[in-house]
Amino acid sequence: MKDIFVLIEHRRGEMRDVSLEMLSGAAKLGGTVVAVLLGKDVDAFADKAAGFADKVLYVNDAMFDNYNSAVYQKALSALIKEHGPGVVLMGNTAQGVDLAPALAVELGASLVTDVTAMEMEGDKPKPTRTFYGGKLDAHFTLKDADLYILTIREATFVAEEPSKSGEIVKVDNPVTEDVPYRKFLEYVEPEVGEVDITQSTLLVGVGRGIREDKNLPVVEELAQAMGADLAASRAVVDAGWLPSDRQVGISGKTVKPKLYLAVGISGAFQHVTGMKGSEVIVAINKDPDAPIFGIADYGIVDDLFKVVPKLVEKVKELKGA
Amino acid sequence: MCAEELDFVEKYDLLGCIQCGRCTGGCPVALRTDLRVRCFMYDTLNEERLEEMSEKPEIWDCTTCYTCAARCPKGLEPLEVLIGLRSLQIEEGKVQPTVRDALESIFKDGNPWGSPRAKRLDWAADLEVKSLEPEAEETTDVLLFICCTDAYDPRVMKAAQALVKVLNAAGVDFGLIGEDESCCGSEVRRLGEEGLFEMCDEENVELLNSYNVNRIVAISPHCYNTLKKEYHGLKHQVLHYTELIAELLEDGKLELPNEIAKVVTYHDPCFLGKQNDIYDEPRYIITRIPGVEFREFDRCRERSLCCEGGGGKMWVESESKEERLAEVRVEDAKEIGAEIIAVACPFCLLTLEDATKVKGVDEEMRVMDILELLAEAL
Amino acid sequence: MNMVVCVKRVPDTADSEVHIDASGKDIDKSRLSFGINECDNYAVEEAIQIKERLEGTVTVISLGNKESDEVIRMALAKGGDEAIRLEDDAFAGGDALAIAKALAAAIKGLEYDVVFTGALTDDDGFAAVPVALAELLGVPHATYVKKVEILEPGKKAKVGRELEGGLMEFLEIDMPCVLGIQTGINEPRYASFKGIKQAAKKEIALKSAADLGLEASDLGEAGSWAVLDSFTPPVVGEMAEILEGEPEETAAKLAAILKEKGLV
């Protein structure tokens, strides 16, 4: 079997989880696993990857200090042509999606994106991905090609313990000229203090169940512990406990966070319409008939004043660990 | 529309306005917003100012309750001028995203709530209902026109479910048209989307005319008003459910054996009361329920205080931070010692119930559709 | 600036149940509503806003059958100038690569500064068309774009890509280029019913595979990276899983679930 290349993804001094996940997953497919690392002075990542790969190809150059898909494409294209892997895996991330299709077209490789499961049939991967926002699994057969590229969804594979000691091979930068048509400028953090809940990844929604505004701190603490933003049902905004830009619902905002934790929210239709697109919905409400349980993935039927403080404790424990 | 668009002055007979101020004087939202409809009657005389007028946010505060038109000594309809200004914004595509979403949803799925058409009959899943087919040989007495809000909103659908229970108990021969039913377009017209309203009008009239029924009964006063007075060419008689139920009670077809020993008041919906003069039937129904102690609001019948649900207000946030009219209404109900506020409109149900929560009285005071009271009394 | 916007008509499956049809390779669409792909709606608005600021033309392109005209007309009603629809039975079964090849064939003969597409589609979610299209056209690209600033019309733009966690990656890109637009970049306007009817008077140029000079190997399954074998329903529970126990226990269970999902 030909080698499997796994592109290490990193940003601003941190290696992203998907990298080790893919390395662990690739190790189970058979064949030599080669981690490909492009960066500037990221020796620590090379060392880390070596625990999970049979070999690490490490290109250390200022050109790769910050991600630029045009530059990555040139480098990878050269490395692939030289080393001839059969499969290239990269994360289905903002970086990976910006790169994989162009690389596939350039090299005549066959590509499937956002893979959530895969097996090998000889040298050829057999990928599964989802359709319709995750409502169906879709099983694909890749067209025969000399190279297969797959972008892998985060948390598809599990990062195991390091068990290998791959050779770290320092490679000269194959990209000899800078890329003039696409230049990295800067990273900009989302503004602090001005919360646009439609852009939040984690939201804690507060409803009338908190009874009075002097009980808000209970939920604020939870949001803070989780690194989440506060959203509100209309009743809470009407009562003036939270500003109107936090209102979720028919006459407020529509949000699609990765997590919507509804606390003391009954799940009135007009509110639910604004958050039902959330990936994971959790509800805490003492009313077992509250409509929110009909759309939640997980629910706790209990007094929020008893549950939330405990949840804050547990979350802090897990984060501290 | 057609090539010769009437201009504002002609279309709304602006020169007939004597600037007496009775419109603004009776306008409920003038209490809490910057809307002064009298000024608009004057300022829109100047065609060059129409664009400027149409950009004023207060034109979206109007609930189209009709108080202004009802009070106008010259028989003018100031609310229509505001709707006309809204049209100008609509044609430019400049509306609040929530309004945009509601209108697009009506076009795509036949309801303003972003819910799929395929789920329009889910509310009746556990009920015994007849499905009507177009061009049926047999005549069915009643076609029930279920409002989009009753069909999709989990709180309001309880009223629709109660209606089915009541009609079955009374042995009424009725049917539903299920997924083929589309939004009546009442709010569409009031939001200023004339083109989309014309589509609702044409398509619904053609659809409804294709059913072999004696009459159409609407659950929402908004649907009732539009089907009865705003559609072109609808051949069936249109009733509101309170008219049908009052008839059934009078004819002895409906028995209400169970007591409801509560103090009940009734909130006249603008679209049933002041716009269609249906005041007595709902009161008759409520007072026929054994055990009920009925008390009137001071502001009742023609003077009923608009709940702010109509005129597209379900999708438009007002800029005003003053107390909502629904909250004032709940205060009124508290003052007269009401335990239940009975309503006959889905928007009143939602706005008033929300208000009881904001006011913190939702444990002692319930908001219920008359239908829910009846179902409990069966 | 001359701009092209690619739009797609997709079924609305967000709130609907999705049922696999008898073939196992498609879904039953008989009870679904259709509309413009969400990201494409934002792409249209972005192009129109740039046209309003800087003057120029917007050409709307869609690959699809006659029903796609409704989506094209909505884009024209919002301010689009020209429209092209690519239609051919041979397109059926094509994935992102085949679609990109057809779009590239239609676009390469046009004068354009920016091609806008949606970053991904609501149905297949491949997210590959904008980037593959750029490579086929031989121009630079950026996708997951949340901000566009034209620095020099026809020459350079500053573009912000949205990364995980809301972090923005800003880059400078030369034109002509392809930008894959992410939702939330702007607030799409409303296209009134009357406006769409007016737009229906504009002609939509039709092009077949032959008109585009495409070969059999570019079309449908033959022109794709991969072929769909089958759909299967995912293994998930439907109702909310209610966690049982005292607050101490339920809180612990919930925290563990959140951690497992990478949400804590």
Image: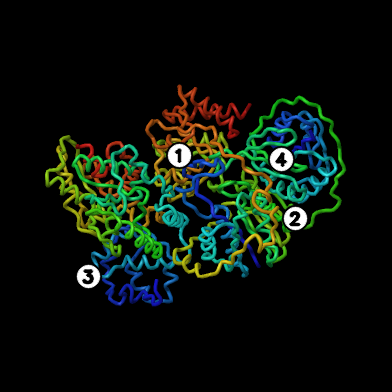
Residue C155 seen in the current view: yes
| Disc 2 and disc 4 on one polypeptide chain | yes
Dot in front, 4 or 1: 4
Whole-percent x and y of residue C71? 52, 59
Alpha-carbon distance for marks 3 and 4? 74 Å
Front-lying residue, C14 or A13: C14
In terms of secondary structure, where does tag 3 sit?
loop
Characterize the local packing of mark 3: few (<14), some (14-19) or many (20 or more) Cα atoms within 10 angstroms.
few
Whole-percent x and y of residue A295? 45, 37
Whole-percent x and y of residue A222? 52, 34
Alpha-carbon distance for marks 2 and 3? 69 Å
In the drawing, what numbered circle is on residue A206?
Answer: 1
Alpha-carbon distance for marks 1 and 2? 44 Å
- Residue A169: which quarter of the image? top right
Label 3 sits on residue: B73
Characterize the local packing of mark 2: few (<14), some (14-19) or many (20 or more) Cα atoms within 10 angstroms.
many
Q: Amino acid at mark 3?
A: Pro
| Disc 3 and disc 4 on one polypeptide chain | no
In the drawing, what numbered circle is on residue A182?
Answer: 2
Whole-percent x and y of residue B94? 48, 63
In terms of secondary structure, where does tag 4 sit?
strand
Earlier sequence position, callout 1 versus callout 2: 2
Label 4 sits on residue: A90
Q: Mark 3 touching mark 4, by CB under 8 A?
A: no
Dot in front, 1 or 2: 2
Dot in front, 3 or 4: 4
| Disc 4 and disc 1 on one polypeptide chain | yes
Query: Please, which chain is the residue tagged with disc 3 on?
Result: B
Alpha-carbon distance for marks 4 and 1? 38 Å
Q: Amino acid at mark 4?
A: Met
Earlier sequence position, callout 2 versus callout 4: 4
